[in-house]
Image (cartoon, rainbow, N blue to C red):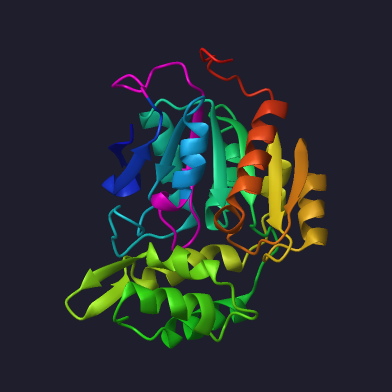
Amino acid sequence: MIRRIEVTGAGSVRLAAWDYAAESKEDGSDGRPGVLLLHGLMGRASHWAGTARRLAPRYRAIALDQRGHGRSDKPEGPYSREAYLADAEAAVEQLGLAPVTLVGHSMGALTAWQLAARRPDLVRAVVVCDMRAAALGEASQRDWESWFASWPLPFASLADVRKWFGEDDPWVDPPRPTRGDFYTEIMEERGDGWRPVFARRHMLRSRAPWILDAHWEELTQVRCPALVVRGLEGELGRAEAQEMVRVLPRGSYAEIPDAGHLVHWEQPTAWYETVERFLEESAIPRQRTETS
């Protein structure tokens, strides 16, 4: 059973979330350890559906649409690190998930380890998927502005979305066909065709605070078990990933072959096995089932 729920984030922003915990009690208090799944920039909760369903028999898996994304509110601001952190903190507390395992991809991974550093009382473990700790710089933001401007909006059909992002996007070399399916989920049909569910200006505002700063110090403050996962062809390089593991007090590392930035989307089976193994090795308590 999948149940849609709502969370009140910072500044009374309404956040949509999906509870995948099968046969959970109405208030969610069925004894399952909590797992909160945080998507990356431009993503949405539905991108975690496979992961959430895989974890649901033993964990209370909840996927959150972060502010400006999916079906959550899209105010003009703020899109600061502080706002994203406060939203995640509110979700953990209001849904009674603590101590929670945070599973984050890209921007969501940064939020996960920042929250673990700030509120160790709320966080049991962290999975960091393909997010860099180093500052990316102003040039990166200019590149994103140019990339957004290159989108041939509106798209006439979802097939056109799938083809452009999977095969024709001039900013991606080599093409990655699986990207096409990923991007179809962040589009909605409007009067003139298919457009993103988010405002691109909001995405640039969300990105601005973290591309100019490095985040190594916060990693040193994460005292719970933390797994750094990278796709071999992703944005997080091996040397940087291993340095992140080194500075994490309880860090561990995993690589997934034949995957780019969208690790959990491109290689779902390897991703599931990696996350489940980490939960086991981190001694995250599981709810016993009849087949256990």
Q: Nearer the viewer, residue 290 or 272?
A: 290
The residue depicted at 66 percent of the width and 61 percent of the height is: 259
- Counting from the top left corner in percent of width and height, residue 283 is at 68, 22
Q: Which residues are magenta?
A: 23-47
The residue depicted at 45 percent of the width and 71 percent of the height is: 204
Name the residue at the front extreme: 291
Image position of 119 with respect to 271: above or below: above
- Counting from the top left corner in percent of width and height, residue 217 is at 71, 49
- Counting from the top left corner in percent of width and height, residue 72 is at 30, 52
Residue 67 found in image quarter: bottom left
Q: Nearer the viewer, residue 97 or 261?
A: 261
Image position of 123 with respect to 211: above or below: above
Describe residue 247's horizontal placement relative to residue 35 as left or right.
right
Q: Is residue 134 visible?
A: yes
Image quarter where the N terminus lies is top left
The residue depicted at 47 percent of the width and 39 percent of the height is: 52
Residue 44 found in image quarter: bottom left
Q: Nearer the viewer, residue 131 or 279?
A: 279
Q: Is residue 223 visible?
A: no
